[in-house]
Amino acid sequence: MSGHSKWSTIKRKKGANDAQRAKIFTKISREIIVAVKSGGPDPDNNSRLKDIISKARSNNMPNDNINRTIKKAAGAGDTDNYENITYEGYGPNGVAVIVDTLTDNRNRTAADMRHYFDKFGGNLGQTGCVGYLFDKKGVIVIEDGGDVDEDTLTMDALEAGADDVSVEEGYFEITTDPDSFHSVRDFLEEKYTLSSAEVSLIPQTTVDLTDEKQLSMMTKLLETLEDNDDVQEVYHNWNAPDTEEDE
């Protein structure tokens, strides 16, 4: 449920039950397979694979699972073929939604997306209909356990090439230009424990929902999208209430 902040998403994934965790691992495995097939099995020579391995570890995916998936994807007998398709549309009250998918059946996935948007008070749009409302940014999150000095981290991040460091309750969020993301992440990874590091879509403005029906429909739309095996990431500009505090 990626919106203007990554922290709720990270906390939810950390607190996921076994079934949810298995679904997250399945989605990440698809990303690994695509990365290996496009750039090879060596993360030192495949920056996309390196990014996904970092994402897998931040989601507590065991190294055995990661290595097994890499070996499977690199094997001549692997027949898994996925293509990346991005869908754009509107949720209740015009909330902008972007859905990144990896699918082995584009007709099935397109039908699912259209059904979900229609069912929960939105509509699927054309490519580009809401993409202009988001900026692509590298987003690095470091949890504040009381042992991170704000001034030192800020200086380190800016020295590495980050655009900005924001301090929120419980975490630091570092944003970068997409082209600088890898170098900033690698630099900070040597000094800090990263809770999350990925290139994301950040909304330029957010939309508030006050109608109870719209709130319910928007929540259900996002939950249903994220539950679909073909969906990798969901971005939106809803200023969603943080409901993860107690997880």
Image (cartoon, grey):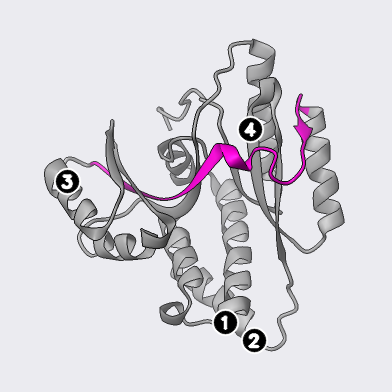
Label 3 secondary element = loop
Question: Which amino acid is tagged 4?
Answer: Ala
Foreground mark, 1 or 4? 4
Label 4 secondary element = strand
Mark 3 or mark 2, which is nearer the start of the sequence?
2
Report the residue marked by disc 3.
Answer: 148
Mark 1 or mark 3, which is nearer the start of the sequence?
1
Residue 60 x/y as whole percent = 44, 57
Q: Which residues are magenta?
A: 120-144
Q: Residue at 73% across / 46% down in the picture?
A: 127
Report the residue marked by disc 2.
Answer: 75
Report the residue marked by disc 4.
Answer: 96
Give me the disc on residue 62: none
Mark 4 or mark 1, which is nearer the start of the sequence?
1
Contact check, label 4 and label 3, Cβ < 8 Å: no
> How far apart in space, not on screen, are marks 4 and 2 (Cα)?
40 Å
Report the residue marked by disc 1.
Answer: 71
Q: Residue 139 lies in magenta, yes or no?
A: yes
